[in-house]
Image (cartoon, rainbow, N blue to C red):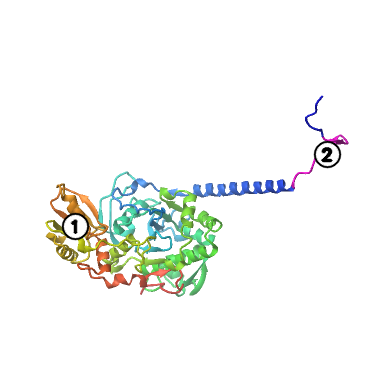
Amino acid sequence: MGVRGRKPERRGGRGIRKPRSRKRWIIGIAASVVVLLVAGAGAIYLKLNANIATFDSAGLSKNRPAAAKADANGDKAVNVLLIGSDTRAGENGKLGGSKSGPIGRSDTTILLHVYPDHKHAVGISIPRDSLVDIPPCLLPDGKWSPDQPSAMFNSAFSMGNTEKGNPACTQNTIEKLSGLRVDHTMVIDFAGFASMTSAVHGVEVCVPNNIYQGDMNPNLGHKGKVVLKAGMQNLQGQQALDYVRVRHGVGDNSDVGRMLRQQAFLSALISKVKGQGMNPTTLLPLANAATKSLTVDPGLGSALKLMNFGLSLKNIDLKNIQFITAPWKYAGSRIDLVHPDVDNLFAELRADRTLEGVNASGKTAPTPTPSATVDGTGIMVSVYNGTYTGGLAAKAADLLKAHSFTVMNSTNAKTKDHTVTRIEYGTGADAKAHAETVAKLFPGAQLVQLDTTGVNVVLGTDYAAAAAKSGTPGSATPNPSATDLSKQARSADADPCSKLSYG
C-alpha cells in the first residue's frame, strides 16, 4: 500500500510534535490586545453616543444664509454656536441654585468662526442683554412665534419655556444678526461645564481680586467668607463654575465684564488641552464629561463627529485663537449693539478675514476686475442703503455715476438688516445683462430676478466693510472703533491676568 505521509514517531503512546513558533504566540497576543482595544473604544463611543442629546432641526429658519462653499481640497469655514445654559433642572440646581427654576436660559453665547485655512479661529461673545431682532421660532405646540424687533437676546433661548431651552431659536437669531450660516450648535449646562473642568484636572486662571460669598449671592446680606482668592488659581468643578458666573465684586459688576473672564477661562482651557496633546486619549475623557450634559444639532450627534471636530482644531496656534465681544454700548439697563461696527465685524468673518485683516481663506484672494472697464451707459439704476452706515447710498450712487450709469434714486431701504448686497433686475431682454454689468462694481453681490423696472442695488454690510477697507471712490468712511477690534481681542496665549473686567 502506498503511504501519503509518514506518521509521527510515537514515544510512550504519544506523538512527538514540534513546539509552536514563538512568533505565532506574539501575533496571537497582539491580535487579542487589538481586539480588546477596538472593543473598548467601541464601548466608549457607544457610551458617548448614548450621552449625547440632539435638538430638532425642524425649528431652524427656512430663510437661512447660504452655506460656505468648500474649495478644491474640501476646506471651508465652519461656524459653531456655543451656548451655556443656566437651567436649574436636575443636578444643575445643586451647582447654580434652584431659585430661578428649571426653565432653560442662555447664560453665555459665543459664535466660533473657524477659518478655512484651519490656522485661525475667532470667538464672538454676544451680550445676553443686548437688543436684537428675533426672527420667527418654532414653539413646543408646533406654532411659530412672530418677529420680535428689539428683543433681549437671551430671550430667544427661552422661547417655549422648556428645561432644554430653544437652541434652534438662538441659532436663527445669530444667523439673522451675522449673515453667517451656523454649521453646528452646542449647548452645555452647569453640570457639564463643571465635569469638563474636572476631566482636565483643573484650569489655571487669574482671579482679579478676592471673591466673597456675598459676591456670588448678592442676596446674602453680608460679605461672607472668601470663595476665590486673588491671583493664579487651579480651578475645577464648582469653583470653576463660580469663576465664570461671578458678576458682582469685580469691575463694574456687569455681564460684559463677566464675558471677559469667560473668554480668559476658555483660553486657559484650550491651552491646557492643547498642552496635553490634541488626541483621542486627551479628548475622550473630556468628551465623556461634556456629553453627559450636552445638547447638539443633529449634524454633531455622534461621538465620532464631535471627536473629528475637536481634532480639526489641533493645528491652530494659541496666538491665532482669538475672542472678542461684539461691539456694544449701554442703553439704560440693556445693551445696544453698535452699528455699523458689529456689521463690519461679521462682514470680515464672512470674507474670511481675521480681525487684523489677514486673508485666512486658505487661498490667494482673486484680483478684482478693474473698475475702468465698466461702462454703464444707458443702464438705469436705483440705489438703496440696507445698512446702518449713513450716506452709503449717496456714495455708491457717485461710484455708479462715475462709470456712466444713470442713477434714478438714491435713498434708504425699507429695512437695515441686509448683510449681503443684492442686485435686483426685471424680466426684460437685457435686464440680466445690465445687472451683471452693475455687479462688476459690487463684487460678491447676489443677483435676484424680480418684477421691477431697471436695476436696483440694495447695499449690504459687506459693501460697507469692503468699501471702507479699500478706500476706493465712493467708499464709506472707516469707523475708528471698528479698526481697533484686533486690539480689543484676546488671544488664547495672552497674559492670563489681562482684560478680566470692564469698568
At mark 1, the secondary structure is: strand
Which circle's residue, 2 or 1, is located before the other in the chain? 2
Q: Which mark is residue 457?
A: 1
Which quarter shows the C terminus? bottom left
Q: Which of 472 and 105 is in front in this view?
A: 472
In the image, residue 273 lies at what x, y percent?
Answer: 51, 63
The magenta segment is: 8-21
Q: Tell me, yes or no, whether the two marked residues, 2 and 1, touch with CB atoms within 8 Å.
A: no
Magenta-drawn stretch contains 20: yes
Question: Would you say 135 lies left or right of 275 here?
Answer: left
In the image, residue 141 lies at what x, y percent?
Answer: 32, 44
Question: Residue reaching furthest top?
Answer: 1
Q: Quadrant of residue 396?
A: bottom left
In the image, residue 22 lies at what x, y percent?
Answer: 74, 48
Give the residue drawn at x 54%, y 60%. 199
Q: Which of marks 2 and 1 is in front?
A: 2
Which quarter shows the N terminus? top right
Q: Nearer the viewer, residue 293 or 141?
A: 293
Residue type at mark 2: give it.
Ile
